[in-house]
């Protein structure tokens, strides 16, 4: 059984990763007939790395950033988002979403500030709506910033930050994204900033989840990439079996977030089950 360590996980070919992702971005934009990409800039490592990759792939003139703070957004996150936009030379728009969020709160009969999960999830869903408005208006695609760790443990808002067209860093674990950021030239204060969706005051991802990404990434690699059982994963990573099982339960319980809506079968060919549109190189569907 292989031994899986964090050192092994971050020892990847970042030059190849960069080339592979930027080629993918260019190909997708071309095939979509889009003029570029719009991205939400949070000042965190994921959005910053994704923005750097977009500019490498498309050039700064084809990338638009949106900085969309709420009162729970720390000033340093706004400064870091503006720094990234400035370094990359991309056009960006600053939209304080406080009034939009408060309008939702006043309009929802059962709204409760005490239910911070439901209230907090309004923020990424408002941001998603704004991103798609800009994408429609500018003939662009919406680029998501979720990484493999977040996608697997379901640490994103369904139809919020999960509502995007492509996820360029979706096959990289959080710790790999941090070192890719270093490779691309991000300063340490962004590359290694503690992750947080900032849905409420003093929220941090690791504080809410109850485990560190350095631990969860090697566990996920064992469970998903190597297809180990929880018992095997605990032995291969040296992590407590209780922690491995906790992570695996999160993966299983959040599968609904990673799926498109399920359609019940009532006809000969059911969308998403046994029929998907095949497309040839001309863009025309095959018979």
Image (cartoon, rainbow, N blue to C red):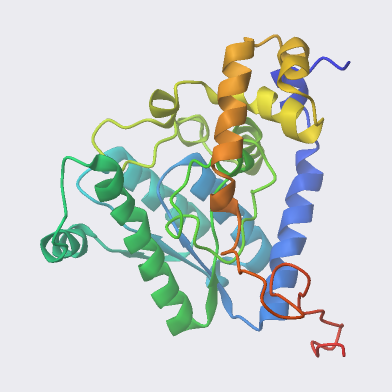
- Relative placement, left or right, of 63 versus 16 is left
Quarter of the image for the C terminus: give it: bottom right
> Relative to residue 174, is residue 138 depicted above or below?
below
Q: Nearer the viewer, residue 173 or 89?
A: 173
Would residue 47 appear left or right of 112 to someone viewing this image?
A: right
Residue 182: percent from the left, percent from the top? 61, 35
Q: Where is 47 relative to 29, above or below?
A: above
Residue at 69% from the left image edge and 23% from the top image edge: 218
Q: Is residue 220 above or below residue 269?
A: above
Based on the displayed image, in which of its 4 quarters is residue 7 positioned? top right
In x, y percent, where is residue 238?
70, 9
Percent coordinates x, y for residue 138 in the rendering: 47, 82
**Residue situated in front as seen by the camera: 174 or 15:** 174
Give the residue furthest to the left: 106
The foreground one among 44 and 257 is 257
**The one of 110 and 136 positioned closer to us in this rendering:** 110
Residue depicted at 45% across the width and 42% down the height: 44
Q: Quadrant of the N terminus?
A: top right
The residue depicted at 76 percent of the width and 75 percent of the height is: 276
Is there any visible trace of residue 91 in the rendered image? yes
Give residue 199's position: percent from left, percent from top. Answer: 30, 43
The answer to whether residue 153 is visible is no
Left or right relative to 81: residue 264: right
């Amino acid at each position: 059984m292989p031994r899986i360590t964090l050192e092994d996980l971050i020892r990847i070919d970042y030059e190849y990763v960069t080339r592979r992702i930027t080629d993918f971005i260019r190909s997708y934009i071309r095939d979509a007939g889009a003029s570029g990409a719009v991205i939400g800039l949070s000042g965190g490592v994921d959005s910053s790395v994704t923005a750097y990759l977009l500019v490498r792939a498309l050039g700064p003139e084809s990338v638009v950033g949106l900085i969309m703070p709420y009162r729970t957004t720390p000033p340093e996150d706004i400064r870091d988002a503006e720094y990234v936009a400035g370094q990359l030379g991309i056009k960006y728009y600053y939209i304080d979403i406080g009034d939009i969020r408060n309008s939702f709160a006043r309009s929802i009969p059962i709204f409760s500030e005490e239910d911070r999960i439901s209230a907090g999830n309004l923020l990424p869903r408002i941001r998603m709506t704004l991103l798609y408005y800009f994408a429609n208006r500018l003939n662009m695609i919406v680029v998501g910033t979720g990484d493999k760790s977040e996608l697997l443990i379901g640490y994103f808002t369904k139809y919020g930050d999960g509502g995007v067209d492509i996820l360029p860093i979706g096959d990289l674990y959080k710790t790999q994204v941090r070192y890719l950021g270093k490779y691309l030239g991000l300063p340490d204060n962004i590359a290694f900033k503690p992750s947080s969706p900032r849905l409420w005051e003093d929220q941090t991802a690791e504080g809410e989840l109850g485990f560190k990404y350095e631990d969860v990434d090697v566990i996920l690699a064992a469970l998903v990439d190597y297809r180990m059982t929880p018992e095997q994963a605990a032995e291969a990573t040296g992590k407590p079996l209780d922690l491995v099982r906790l992570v695996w339960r999160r993966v299983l319980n959040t599968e609904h977030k990673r799926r498109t809506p399920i359609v019940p079968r009532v006809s000969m060919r059911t969308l998403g089950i046994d029929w998907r549109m095949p497309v040839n190189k001309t863009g025309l569907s095959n018979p």
